[in-house]
Image (spheres, helix red, strand yellow):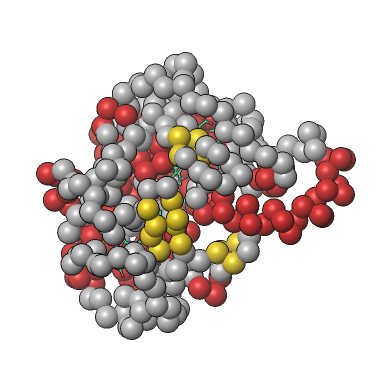
Amino acid sequence: MKTWTKIVSAVASVTAIVAGTTALYYGTYLPRSAQPRSGHVPVSAERLTRGKYLFEVVADCDGCHSERDYSRFGGPVVVSGRGKGQVIPEKGPISPLVTANITPDKETGLGQWTDGEKIRAIREGISRDGRTLFPMMPYKNFSKMSDYDVESLVAYMNTLQPVRNPMPKMKIPFPISFMMKSYPEPVSNVKAPERGRNAEYGAYLATLGHCMDCHTPPDGHKLDEGMKFAGGRVFDTPLGKVVSANITPDPETGIGRWSEDYFIQRFALQRTYVVNGAPKLQPGQFTLMPWLNLSQLDPDDLSAIYRFLQTQSTIPNKVEKHPGTVQTAGF
Ligand code: HEC
Ligand code: HEC
């Protein structure tokens, strides 16, 4: 979502510049890309568990690629539609927003793709046919995903139930279609910091979980670097309106007064919804925060994320998360 908004708002300012050079490059300009690697990803029980954890919890592939029940709190995943793709209604210049069927279905999903092609799409943003993926797919974040993790993720994706679900083509207007070709970059040999309850590993998880993108307000065509994690990004969707929270260490308007234990509990609160089913969405509860998925984060991983967030600049920024509604306790 973020990059989409970014691009759309950038369009006005760059149109003039691009127009001059377009005639020359349009059609011939190709994204930077490398050959996908060959062979199959290694499979083991440990890797499958890791891949599932990345898909369902940390990187929230479910959030954009699986069928969801938005009539319930947090939009729980409809398991029979895991990975089948979503068509997201939008009022903007790209309507509808179409994700992709990433189940192993041979005709409408990734069934014919090699593992290398899947890895390239996830980390580099290049589709099987060489097309640049629309950067709402957070491949810039996923470019930081370690080789071990991306291989594990693909090993798990290969075990998903194939779902036949042809997706409509997304129409990306010029010049957005042109500008996004500069996004992809070849990626190889990525290592993750050693797993542990420390800020460095927390930064890795927060990158894969794209926390910053939702929790930083935009500034024209980019994220506002001076407001990292300060919240205030408005999501005004057909389903409801919600504003991201300030998660900097500011004691008054951020999470500066939260203890590490409280932070972990705040996520664990939603775990019962995953086990017992989420309740019907009440007015003022609509959110895009992936509470259900993130509630399943390992407590050590939540510690790492907490410790990383504590190293960020303290930025006072008061946010009303659910504008114009009475808050329900706990949300
Ligand atoms: C914020 C939403 C979002 C998230 C999160 C997301 N994706 Fe995507 N993904 C998209 C969109 C949108 C597209 C389609 C882009 C296009 O067609 O240009 C896409 C495309 C893809 C493709 C290419 C499919 C094709 O046919 O070209 C793959 C593979 C993929 N995503 C895998 C993943 C995996 C694995 C994850 C989790 C690690 C993930 N995505 C997380 C939005 C998302
Ligand atoms: C798709 C957008 C999105 C992503 C991704 C996202 N958040 Fe959020 N987050 C929100 C929104 C919107 C809210 C405010 C509404 C709510 O609390 O549900 C929020 C609320 C929160 C809160 C509650 C703060 C408070 O004051 O109550 C915390 C803590 C938080 N997010 C941490 C994270 C972390 C850590 C990550 C990454 C692992 C993350 N978020 C990823 C959108 C997002």
Residue at position x 74%, y 59% in the image: 13
Residue 182: percent from left, percent from top: 69, 47
Observer-nearest of 199 and 268: 268
Q: Is residue 204 visible?
A: no
Q: Is residue 90 visible?
A: yes
Residue 45: percent from left, percent from top: 25, 34
Residue at position x 41%, y 22% in the image: 165
Q: Quadrant of residue 215?
A: bottom left
Q: Quadrant of residue 148?
A: top left
Is residue 76 depicted above or below 249 in this figure?
above
Q: Is residue 286 left or right of residue 26?
A: left
Report the residue that reaches farthest toward the front.
324
Residue at position x 24%, y 67% in the image: 327
Q: Quadrant of the C terminus?
A: bottom left
Observer-nearest of 299 and 238: 238
Is residue 111 depicted above or below 63 in this figure?
above
Observer-nearest of 84 and 260: 84
Residue at position x 83%, y 48% in the image: 19
Q: Is residue 133 left or right of residue 148?
A: right
Residue 84: percent from left, percent from top: 38, 29
